[in-house]
Amino acid sequence: MPQLFKPSTNTLARVSLFGALGAVAFLLWLLAAFAGSGWITRENVPRTQPVAFSHEHHVGADGIDCRYCHTSVERSAFAGIPPARTCMNCHAQIWATSPALAPVRESMRTDRPIRWTRVHDLPDFVYFHHGIHVQKGIGCSTCHGRVDRMPLTMQVVSLQMRWCLDCHRRPERWVRPRAEVFSMEWQPPPEQAALGRKLVAQYGIAGSALLTSCDVCHR
């Protein structure tokens, strides 16, 4: 029986096979890169709000503490969005007739909350408790970035599971003294490794095996 294929066909078959496997691997890598890109996570994308509120002005310039507006952050799962009356504590005297604050005055008049655009929005199947993280020494800027430098608030981390797990596996890298939780300027000192281990023990932070258990976040 005559030979149907030339010997060179074997080489072509091998090249085609490895080429197909390489193409599949590349497509999987491309999909993973796209899933972690800003197009999906919306990192570093300023969000337009119904009121042009600037954290840079209120926190950075005026020095207003996070807890003045986010009153429940130390004890609740939610940091809380300030009602219009919190804004008007100051703005009844300052810029009281400014057109930019018309939505705030309207909210006060009608007793209807302002419909803010949410910046940090976790999926419904993820459980997160602000109060626990605050009490365990995780600073606001660790997750929210330097909001004192943001004219418009933006998300500065991916909020994807691998980002959460990176902290849960090695909390000593991120934990800080509780007195510095609300400080925007605080930076890990050179001795953070030793300090972190000390604070992990002092604050009763669970080991990584427990912190990375599925039911910690998925309840």
Image: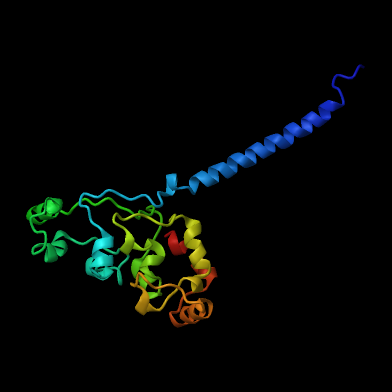
The mark tally for this picture is 0
Q: Quadrant of residue 11?
A: top right
Classify residue 58 as left or right of residue 213: left
> Where the N terminus falls, by quadrant?
top right
The colouring scheme, among rainbow, by chain, secondary structure or one colour, is rainbow
Query: Considering the image in quadrants, where does the C terminus appear?
Result: bottom left
**Which residue does the image show at 25% across and 58% down from the upper left?**
54
Is 216 located above or below residue 113 in the figure?
below
Along the line of sight, the residue nearer the viewer: 15 or 186 = 186
Horizontal and vertical percent position of residue 181: 36, 73
Q: Nearer the viewer, residue 157 or 54?
A: 54
Which residue lies most toward the right here?
1
Visible residue check, residue 213: no
Residue 89 position in % (x across, y down): 12, 66
Residue 178 in the figure: left or right of residue 84: right
Q: Is residue 75 above or below residue 82?
A: below
